[in-house]
Amino acid sequence: MTRKILLTLASLFLIGQSYKLAVLIPKLGAESWGAAIFLGWLISLFITGIFAFAGFAWPTQRLMPEAYYKVYYPKRLKRIGKALNIELFRKMLLATLWKNRERQKEFFDGTKDRLENLETQSKKSEFGHLIPFIIIQALSVYWFTIGLIKLGIATFVFNIAGNIYPVILQRNHRMRIQVMKRRLQSKSRV
Protein backbone atom coordinates (compact mmCIF):
# COMPACT_ATOMS: atom_id res chain seq x y z
CA MET A 1 0.00 0.00 0.00
CA THR A 2 2.89 2.36 0.74
CA ARG A 3 4.18 1.79 -2.79
CA LYS A 4 0.80 2.78 -4.27
CA ILE A 5 0.68 5.93 -2.18
CA LEU A 6 4.22 6.95 -3.15
CA LEU A 7 3.63 6.28 -6.84
CA THR A 8 0.35 8.20 -6.74
CA LEU A 9 2.09 11.12 -5.03
CA ALA A 10 4.84 11.03 -7.68
CA SER A 11 2.17 11.13 -10.39
CA LEU A 12 0.42 14.07 -8.71
CA PHE A 13 3.75 15.87 -8.33
CA LEU A 14 4.40 15.48 -12.06
CA ILE A 15 0.92 16.79 -12.87
CA GLY A 16 1.78 19.96 -10.96
CA GLN A 17 5.22 20.26 -12.54
CA SER A 18 3.84 19.65 -16.04
CA TYR A 19 1.20 22.31 -15.56
CA LYS A 20 3.72 24.84 -14.24
CA LEU A 21 6.10 24.11 -17.10
CA ALA A 22 3.37 24.34 -19.77
CA VAL A 23 2.24 27.71 -18.35
CA LEU A 24 5.80 29.01 -17.94
CA ILE A 25 7.13 28.04 -21.39
CA PRO A 26 5.15 30.63 -23.41
CA LYS A 27 6.39 33.34 -21.02
CA LEU A 28 10.01 32.20 -21.27
CA GLY A 29 9.95 31.28 -24.93
CA ALA A 30 12.24 28.73 -26.47
CA GLU A 31 14.06 30.61 -29.18
CA SER A 32 17.18 28.47 -29.43
CA TRP A 33 17.27 24.85 -30.55
CA GLY A 34 19.02 23.91 -27.31
CA ALA A 35 16.25 25.38 -25.16
CA ALA A 36 13.56 23.89 -27.41
CA ILE A 37 15.10 20.42 -27.26
CA PHE A 38 15.56 20.56 -23.49
CA LEU A 39 12.04 21.86 -22.80
CA GLY A 40 10.45 19.48 -25.33
CA TRP A 41 12.23 16.55 -23.68
CA LEU A 42 11.32 17.73 -20.18
CA ILE A 43 7.60 18.24 -20.85
CA SER A 44 7.45 14.87 -22.65
CA LEU A 45 9.21 13.19 -19.73
CA PHE A 46 6.95 14.80 -17.13
CA ILE A 47 3.67 14.04 -18.88
CA THR A 48 4.64 10.47 -19.75
CA GLY A 49 5.86 10.03 -16.17
CA ILE A 50 2.42 10.97 -14.82
CA PHE A 51 0.87 7.97 -16.52
CA ALA A 52 3.83 5.67 -15.90
CA PHE A 53 3.70 6.18 -12.13
CA ALA A 54 -0.10 5.91 -12.10
CA GLY A 55 0.15 2.70 -14.14
CA PHE A 56 2.66 1.18 -11.73
CA ALA A 57 0.25 1.85 -8.85
CA TRP A 58 -3.19 1.25 -10.36
CA PRO A 59 -4.85 -0.82 -13.11
CA THR A 60 -5.01 2.16 -15.47
CA GLN A 61 -5.44 -0.10 -18.50
CA ARG A 62 -9.04 -0.66 -17.37
CA LEU A 63 -9.86 2.96 -18.23
CA MET A 64 -9.99 1.94 -21.90
CA PRO A 65 -12.60 -0.54 -23.13
CA GLU A 66 -11.33 -4.08 -23.67
CA ALA A 67 -12.26 -3.85 -27.36
CA TYR A 68 -9.64 -1.11 -27.81
CA TYR A 69 -6.84 -3.52 -26.94
CA LYS A 70 -7.80 -6.18 -29.47
CA VAL A 71 -5.78 -6.02 -32.67
CA TYR A 72 -8.32 -6.19 -35.48
CA TYR A 73 -6.07 -5.58 -38.47
CA PRO A 74 -2.80 -7.45 -37.89
CA LYS A 75 -1.58 -7.10 -41.49
CA ARG A 76 -1.96 -3.32 -41.32
CA LEU A 77 -0.18 -3.24 -37.96
CA LYS A 78 2.68 -5.30 -39.41
CA ARG A 79 3.01 -2.84 -42.33
CA ILE A 80 3.06 0.13 -39.97
CA GLY A 81 5.60 -1.60 -37.73
CA LYS A 82 7.81 -2.38 -40.70
CA ALA A 83 7.56 1.17 -42.07
CA LEU A 84 8.54 2.61 -38.68
CA ASN A 85 11.22 -0.06 -38.13
CA ILE A 86 9.61 -1.07 -34.84
CA GLU A 87 11.87 -4.14 -34.68
CA LEU A 88 14.94 -1.89 -34.40
CA PHE A 89 13.18 0.02 -31.58
CA ARG A 90 12.44 -3.28 -29.79
CA LYS A 91 16.07 -4.40 -30.13
CA MET A 92 17.28 -1.05 -28.82
CA LEU A 93 15.05 -1.44 -25.74
CA LEU A 94 16.30 -4.98 -25.16
CA ALA A 95 19.90 -3.79 -25.43
CA THR A 96 19.39 -0.90 -22.99
CA LEU A 97 16.37 -0.59 -20.68
CA TRP A 98 15.35 -4.26 -20.82
CA LYS A 99 18.84 -5.78 -20.89
CA ASN A 100 18.34 -7.64 -17.60
CA ARG A 101 17.03 -11.16 -18.36
CA GLU A 102 15.56 -11.51 -14.86
CA ARG A 103 13.52 -8.35 -15.36
CA GLN A 104 12.27 -9.71 -18.69
CA LYS A 105 11.22 -12.97 -17.01
CA GLU A 106 9.08 -11.02 -14.52
CA PHE A 107 6.77 -10.25 -17.43
CA PHE A 108 7.06 -13.44 -19.46
CA ASP A 109 9.09 -16.54 -18.86
CA GLY A 110 7.71 -18.61 -21.72
CA THR A 111 5.02 -20.33 -19.68
CA LYS A 112 1.28 -20.29 -20.29
CA ASP A 113 0.65 -18.86 -16.81
CA ARG A 114 2.73 -15.75 -17.49
CA LEU A 115 1.02 -15.04 -20.82
CA GLU A 116 -1.89 -13.29 -19.04
CA ASN A 117 0.58 -11.16 -17.09
CA LEU A 118 2.36 -10.19 -20.30
CA GLU A 119 -0.93 -9.21 -21.89
CA THR A 120 -1.93 -7.11 -18.87
CA GLN A 121 1.45 -5.39 -18.75
CA SER A 122 1.21 -4.71 -22.48
CA LYS A 123 -2.18 -3.04 -22.05
CA LYS A 124 -0.94 -1.05 -19.07
CA SER A 125 2.12 0.11 -20.98
CA GLU A 126 0.13 1.04 -24.05
CA PHE A 127 -2.33 3.07 -22.01
CA GLY A 128 0.61 4.73 -20.25
CA HIS A 129 1.97 5.92 -23.60
CA LEU A 130 -1.26 6.54 -25.54
CA ILE A 131 -2.77 9.18 -23.27
CA PRO A 132 0.52 11.12 -22.93
CA PHE A 133 0.88 10.94 -26.72
CA ILE A 134 -2.48 12.69 -27.15
CA ILE A 135 -1.75 15.34 -24.50
CA ILE A 136 1.77 16.06 -25.75
CA GLN A 137 0.57 16.16 -29.34
CA ALA A 138 -1.97 18.82 -28.33
CA LEU A 139 0.84 20.78 -26.66
CA SER A 140 2.97 20.49 -29.82
CA VAL A 141 0.14 21.98 -31.85
CA TYR A 142 -0.28 24.71 -29.23
CA TRP A 143 3.43 25.57 -29.39
CA PHE A 144 3.14 25.90 -33.18
CA THR A 145 0.09 28.16 -32.94
CA ILE A 146 1.77 30.60 -30.55
CA GLY A 147 4.93 30.77 -32.68
CA LEU A 148 7.21 28.45 -30.73
CA ILE A 149 8.03 26.45 -33.85
CA LYS A 150 11.31 24.93 -32.63
CA LEU A 151 9.68 23.81 -29.39
CA GLY A 152 6.74 22.38 -31.34
CA ILE A 153 9.11 20.38 -33.54
CA ALA A 154 11.23 19.16 -30.60
CA THR A 155 8.16 18.16 -28.58
CA PHE A 156 6.68 16.38 -31.58
CA VAL A 157 9.88 14.37 -32.17
CA PHE A 158 10.23 13.35 -28.51
CA ASN A 159 6.55 12.41 -28.45
CA ILE A 160 6.88 10.13 -31.47
CA ALA A 161 9.99 8.41 -30.09
CA GLY A 162 8.81 8.28 -26.49
CA ASN A 163 5.16 7.43 -26.96
CA ILE A 164 3.98 6.36 -30.41
CA TYR A 165 6.76 3.80 -30.86
CA PRO A 166 5.94 2.14 -27.52
CA VAL A 167 2.21 2.11 -28.39
CA ILE A 168 2.88 0.34 -31.69
CA LEU A 169 5.33 -2.04 -30.02
CA GLN A 170 2.74 -3.02 -27.39
CA ARG A 171 0.10 -3.57 -30.07
CA ASN A 172 2.59 -5.82 -31.86
CA HIS A 173 3.12 -7.77 -28.64
CA ARG A 174 -0.63 -8.24 -28.22
CA MET A 175 -1.02 -9.28 -31.84
CA ARG A 176 1.42 -12.12 -31.12
CA ILE A 177 -0.25 -12.86 -27.78
CA GLN A 178 -3.61 -13.20 -29.55
CA VAL A 179 -2.08 -15.75 -31.93
CA MET A 180 -0.58 -17.70 -29.00
CA LYS A 181 -3.89 -17.70 -27.13
CA ARG A 182 -5.75 -19.00 -30.18
CA ARG A 183 -3.20 -21.80 -30.56
CA LEU A 184 -3.47 -22.71 -26.88
CA GLN A 185 -7.27 -22.73 -27.09
CA SER A 186 -7.26 -24.96 -30.17
CA LYS A 187 -4.83 -27.39 -28.45
CA SER A 188 -7.02 -27.56 -25.35
CA ARG A 189 -10.05 -28.49 -27.47
CA VAL A 190 -8.21 -31.43 -29.02
Image (cartoon, rainbow, N blue to C red):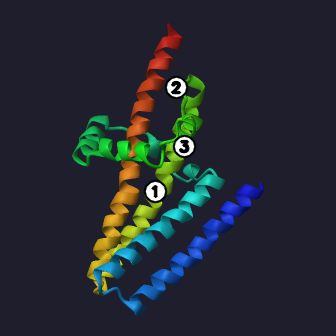
- Provide the residue designation for mark 2: 110
Answer whether residue 28 is visible to the viewer in this image.
yes
Q: In percent of the image, x 23 and y 41: which residue is there?
A: 79
Answer whether residue 65 is visible to the viewer in this image.
no
Quick one: which residue is furthest to the top in this view?
Answer: 190
Alpha carbons under labels 3 and 2: distance apart: 15 Å
Q: Residue 109: image x %, image y %?
A: 55, 29
Which picture quadrant has residue 31?
A: bottom left
Q: Are marks 1 and 2 in contact (CB under 8 Å)?
A: no
Left/right placement of residue 7 relative to residue 145 reads right
Q: Residue 2: image x %, image y %?
A: 77, 57
Image quadrant holding the N terminus, namely bottom right
The residue mark sitting in front, 1 or 2, is 2
Residue 44 vertical placement versus 164 (above, below): below
Q: Residue 34: image x %, image y %?
A: 33, 79
- For marks 1 and 2, the one nearer the N-term is 2
Q: In percent of the image, x 33 and y 60: which residue is there?
A: 160
Q: In percent of the image, x 50 and y 7: which residue is there?
A: 190
Mark 3 residue type: Gln
Left/right placement of residue 102 relative to residue 164 reads right
The residue mark sitting in front, 3 or 2, is 2
Mark 1 residue type: His
Q: Could you say whether the residue bearing mark 3 is in a helix, strand or loop?
A: helix
Residue 12 vertical placement versus 114 (above, below): below
- Provide the residue designation for mark 1: 129
Q: Could you say whether the residue bearing mark 2 is in a helix, strand or loop?
A: loop
- Provide the residue designation for mark 3: 121
The mark total stands at 3
- For marks 3 and 1, the one nearer the N-term is 3
